[in-house]
Amino acid sequence: MSLLRAPILLLARSTKVKQLVSTMPVSSGIVTGYVPGETTADAVRATQGLVDNDLLATLDYLGEDTTDVAHAEATVAAYKDVLAELSARGLASKAEVSVKLSAIGQFLPDQGHKVALENAREICRAARNAGTTVTLDMEDHTTTDSTLSILRELRKDFPETGAVLQAMLHRTEADCRALAYEGSRVRLCKGAYMEPEEVAFQDKVDIDKSYVRCLKALLGGQGYPMIATHDPRMVHIATSLASRFGRRAGTYEFQMLFGIRPEEQKRLAAAGETMRVYIPYGTEWYGYLMRRLAEKPQNLAFFARSLVSKK
Ligand SMILES: Cc1cc2nc3c(=O)[nH]c(=O)nc-3n(C[C@H](O)[C@H](O)[C@H](O)COP(=O)(O)OP(=O)(O)OC[C@H]3O[C@@H](n4cnc5c(N)ncnc54)[C@H](O)[C@@H]3O)c2cc1C
C-alpha cells in the first residue's frame, strides 16, 4: 500500500476537507474521471457506452453512512428507478447494481440491521423483476459480520445476490472457502478502507499474497468468482489459476472501476473474458473519490489544481 494511503484516508474524515472538496462541481476533471454523472440518465448512458464495447456493468448509487430513514428510502427509490430504466432499455441482462448497506440503513440506531435487510430485499425484488441481480458492497471491517449475516438472509429468497470479500482482512481466506459453494457469486477485492493491524494486512506484499490465496479458494471452489482488481499481476495470476482449475470463460468474471485502466478492460473482453465495470453515480461522490485518491496519490497534484481553480 502507498505510504500516503492512510494519511489521505484520515484527512478525508475531516469535515472541513469534506466541505471544501464537496463544493467542486461533478464536472471537474478529477471527479468525472471516476464518476460519470449524478443522475439515472447519466448512469444509463455510461452503461450503454460500456455495453457497446462488449463490457458489462454494475451500478452503484453513491451514498454511505446514512443516519436517517428518509435518506435510506430515497436511496432505495433511486435503485428502483435505475433498475426500471435498465429494463426499459433492454440493458438489464448486461447490468446489475451494487449496494452499500450503510446507505440503506445499516447504521440507523436500534433498527439498523432490520431496516437494511428490508430495504435490500426491496432492491433485490426490483432487480429480479427487471431481470438482473444485486451485489452487496463490503465496507469497513466493523460491518463485515452484519453484512454477511444480511447476505445469508437475502440469499434464502434471492440466492443470486452477490457478496464482496476484501483480501486485506485476515479472516477473508476462510470467508472465501465458506462462500465458494455452487451458485454463490463472490467479488474479491483488496479492500479500500483504513483497517487496524489487528484485523488486516498492512503491506502491499501481504495483501497481494492473501489475494492469491483467496483466488485459489474461489476459483478452485464451486461458486462464481468476480475478480475485482486493476493490478496487472493479480489479473495475470487469476487467468493462470482459472485455466489450472479448468474454469471455462463465463464461469467467473473480471471487474474494474469506471475510468481505471479502460484499455485493459477492453483488452480482457476482446480476449474472451467476461469483464464488468463498476459505475458509481450520484451526488454523494466524496467518500468514493477520496478512497480512489488514496489508492493513487499521483493524482493528488491534479486534484489540488482542480480545487484551486474550482473549474
Ligand atoms: C469492481 C470493484 C468493486 C469494488 N468493491 C469494493 C468493495 O465493495 N469494498 C471495498 O473495500 N473495496 C472495493 N473495491 C476497491 C478495492 O478494494 C481496491 O481498493 C481497488 O480496486 C484498488 O486495488 P487494486 O486491486 O486495483 O490494486 P492496487 O494495487 O491498488 O492497484 C493496482 C494498479 O491499478 C491501478 N489503480 C488502482 N487504483 C487506481 C486509482 N484509484 N486510479 C488510477 N489507477 C488506479 C494502478 O495502475 C495500480 O498500480 C472494488 C474494486 C473494484 C474494481
Image (cartoon, rainbow, N blue to C red):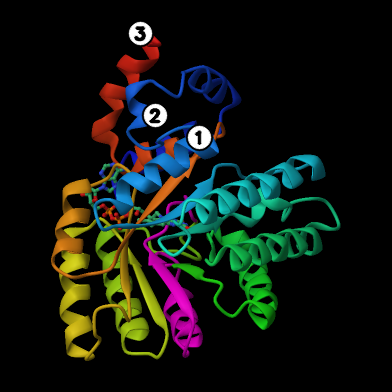
Labelled disc at residue 31: 2
Measured in 3D between alpha carbons, the distance from the residue under mark 3 to the one under mark 2, in whole angstroms, is 14 Å
The answer to whether the residue labelled 2 contacts the one labelled 1, judged by CB atoms less than 8 Å apart, is yes
The correct choice, above or below, for 41 with respect to 263 in the image is above
Measured from the top left, where is residue 102 in percent x and y?
A: 66, 52
Which element type, helix, strand or loop, lies under badge 3? helix
Tell me if mark 2 has few (under 14), some (14-19) or many (20+) residues whose alpha carbon lies within 10 angstroms of its own.
Answer: some
The reply to whether the magenta stretch includes residue 180 is yes
Measured from the top left, where is residue 200 in percent x and y?
A: 45, 64
Q: Of the residues shown, which amino acid type is indicated by label 3? A: Ser
Q: Residue at x 29, y 57 (%)?
A: 55
Q: Tell me the magenta residue range.
A: 166-195
Confirm or reject: label 2 Cβ below 8 Å from ligand 1.
no
Answer with the quarter of the image where residue 223 lies.
Answer: bottom left
* Residue 139 can be seen, yes or no: no
Measured from the top left, where is residue 271 in percent x and y?
A: 13, 67
Looking at the image, tell me whether mark 2 or mark 1 is earlier in sequence order: 2
For label 1, the residue is 285
Looking at the image, tell me whether mark 3 or mark 2 is earlier in sequence order: 2
The correct choice, above or below, for 65 with respect to 163 in the image is above
Q: Quadrant of the C terminus?
A: top left
